[in-house]
Image: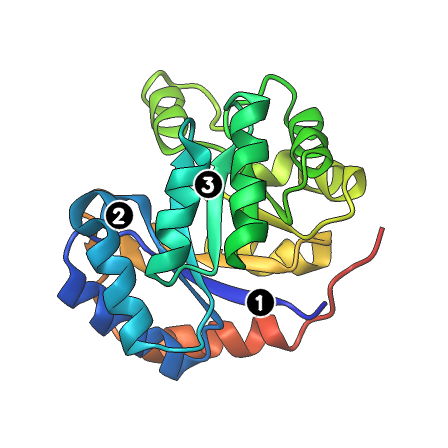
Amino acid sequence: MKPIVQISLDLTNIDEALETAALALRAGVDWLEVGTPLILAEGLHGVRALRQAFPGIPLVADLKTMDGGYLEAEMMARAGATHVVVMARAHPETIKCVVKAGADFGCRVMGDNLNCPDMVAGARFLEDLGCDYVIHHIGYDERRGLAAAGQRMPSPMDQLREVVQAVRVPVQAVGGLSLEQAMECPRCGAPLVVLGAPLTIDADAFKTADGDLEASLRLICQAIHAQDVAAF
């Protein structure tokens, strides 16, 4: 598959999310992500507003589901989400419920390996249970906590190639990537490139970053779309 650019709307205000989404789509972004902060702030109303404003655009609801998988996925799919996120650390039955709801309501499932003791095994586990995509994810709090302690922050790039090689489904790398690293993902075999905090969103304030975001995004999207995804 060709590279796909996704913007994470890690905001807490639906009006700003709609404005940022419109800007991102003009710049060439392919998918919109209803980030966890936006889901917490606006819930289903935010998903419905984005779906109404941008019909036909893939819409990822970053639920980080840990329990109640079928109902959460059903609610988001009915509100207009095309993709939902379930955690590998959830009970296997929860993951199966999300996958079942995805099949019942026409929604794709993204499995997130955040905080798995073995990130590669976590990715395989998600694929084996029926997830359509794997998110290889190093968490925000983990990175900041280690940095505050003077330790090296882990990066999704550390094991990205191993994760890609371990599964057949498309992989997305998330968590503290620099812009250069995000743009490197297709060359590592991960076609789903996420742009968000801290690339286009202020990670501390959860608001849109300053500067000419649209022009920057356009150049980034062009560079990513021009790549071929490496096969391993």
Residue 149 drawn above or below residue 207: above
Q: Which mark is residue 4?
A: 1
Secondary structure at badge 3 equals: loop
User: Could you give the CA–CA distance between mark 2 and mark 3, rounded to whole angstroms?
Assistant: 19 Å
What is the C-alpha distance between the residues marked 1 and 3? 17 Å
Residue drawn 80% across the image and 42% down it: 165
| Disc marking residue 39 | 2
Q: Residue furthest bottom?
A: 26
What residue type is disc 2 on? Answer: Ile
**Horizontal and vertical percent for residue 120?**
70, 29
Q: Position of residue 172 (x, y in %)?
A: 58, 49
**Residue 164 location, quadrant:** top right
Q: Counting residues from the N terminus, which is met first, the one under dot 1 or under dot 3?
A: 1
Q: Given contact means CB atoms under 8 Å apart, are the residues at marks 1 and 2 in contact?
A: no
| Relative side of 102 to 71, left or right | right
Q: Nearer the viewer, mark 2 or mark 3?
A: 2
Locate the N terminus and report the quarter of the image it occupies.
bottom right
Q: Disc 3 residue type?
A: Gly
- Kindly indicate whether the residue at mark 3 contacts the one at mark 1 (C-beta within 8 angstroms): no
Residue 51, placed above or below residue 60: below
Instruction: Estimate the x, y position of residue 217 in percent, counting from the top left.
Output: 40, 73
The residue at the far right in this view is 232
Say if residue 108 shows up in the picture: no
Query: From the viewer's perspective, is residue 92 above or below residue 15?
Result: above
Along the viewing direction, whichever of 191 and 111 lies nearer the viewer: 111
Q: Give the residue displayed 32% in from the left and 21% down from the top.
A: 148
Residue 175: assigned label: 3
Q: Secondary structure at mark 1?
A: strand
Up the image or down, 158 lies above or below 218; here it is above
